[in-house]
Amino acid sequence: MKKRIVLALGGNALGDGLAEQMQAVKTTVKAIADLIAAGHQVVVTHGNGPQVGMINQAFEAAAKADSHTPMLPMSVCVALSQGYIGYDLQNALREELLERGINKPVATLITQVAVNPADPAFLNPTKPIGSFFTKEEAERLMRNGHTLREDSGRGYRRVVASPKPQDIIEKETVRAMLEADQVVITVGGGGIPVLVEGNHLRGASAVIDKDWASAKLAEMIDADMLIILTAVEKVALNYGKPDVQWLDRLSPADAHRFIEEEHFAKGSMLPKVEAALAFAESKAGRQALITVLSKAREGIAGKTGTIICQ
Ligand code: ADP
Ligand code: MG
């Protein structure tokens, strides 16, 4: 059966650094092309942790050297990372498809994601980004509207909020591209966080979790399946312990219970299970799959990975 799939790529799909990323995408696009070749409609989303850190640090270094150079707002850092990662992915995927005789346009969409200014995450920004600053440097940056926190005696670091995605601004464009049988790379790095102020969208000092943004997108474009590709083949109970138990199928009720029992690490597996669960619960028939990049095709066939569905 041909499915509409949102495929979320984790950090291991992109590697760390420029040279590594160029190499990593060559393997990554093979897994994506397999799904396209099988006739599925595919939307690709991805994380941006190392890349957004690199971009932010480059501009921070420039701002330290010259006080007239502004530090980039986090929304701009995310936008730059979408362009850079999207370029590598669309370039490599286009080539892989052409090698297989598939002539399908591939493009990256710079995507904004609305967040709620009343999201409690804004009251307590927790996600540290970039390098360390001295007290004096931090005070200057704070006067310019940035939020910095002392980080365990090591100096000051920029911290941003991680609010939940509310709306994908460019969702109609994603749909239109899918309906025209094109491959779209979207909500990179969780999307550019924006606050809706009438007709104006204002960049927010935040980063959105890519697993949550991918689940929101999957809901909004009425996908059949959300596939979260990461570094492990299956989700586990007692992960990293001798009595580890790998899960094949997870009902929403069990998923809720295991979340309560804290089986999934905050900031890594927890957002994946929560996002997968939210998508699976949003409508009957919707399935979420968490597996490793190289097993995507087998996962869709129900042979491996962890499936979350009603
Ligand atoms: P990504 O870049 O794909 O988002 P993360 O490192 O954020 O990857 O999350 C995936 C990691 O979560 C796995 O590589 C694994 O080490 C870790 N993890 C934490 N808890 C679990 C669990 N219960 N089951 C499986 N993996 C887990
Ligand atoms: Mg992650």
Image: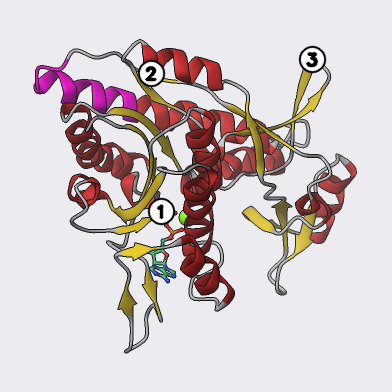
What residue does disc 2 label?
A: 178
Specify the label residue 199 is tagged with. Answer: 3
Task: Tell which of 185 and 270 is nearer to you.
Answer: 270
In the displayed orientation, state which residue is furthest to the right.
143
Image height check: is 233 above or below 106? below
The crowd level at tag 3 (other Cα within 10 Å; few <14, some 14-19, many 20+) is few
Predominant SS of the magenta segment:
helix
Q: What coloring was used for the rendering?
A: secondary structure
Residue at 27% across, 38% down: 25
* Between discs 3 and 2, the one toward the N terminus: 2
In the displayed orientation, state which residue is furthest to the left.
100
> Magenta part of the protein: which range?
89-102
Label 3 or label 1, whichever lies nearer to me, is 1
Label 3 vs label 2: CA separation?
Answer: 26 Å
Q: Is residue 295 visible?
A: yes
In the displayed orientation, state which residue is furthest to the bottom.
242
* Between discs 1 and 2, the one toward the N terminus: 2
Label 3 or label 2, whichever lies nearer to me, is 2
Q: Secondary structure at mark 2?
A: helix
Amino acid type of disc 1? Cys
Amino acid type of disc 3? Asn
What residue does disc 1 label?
A: 309
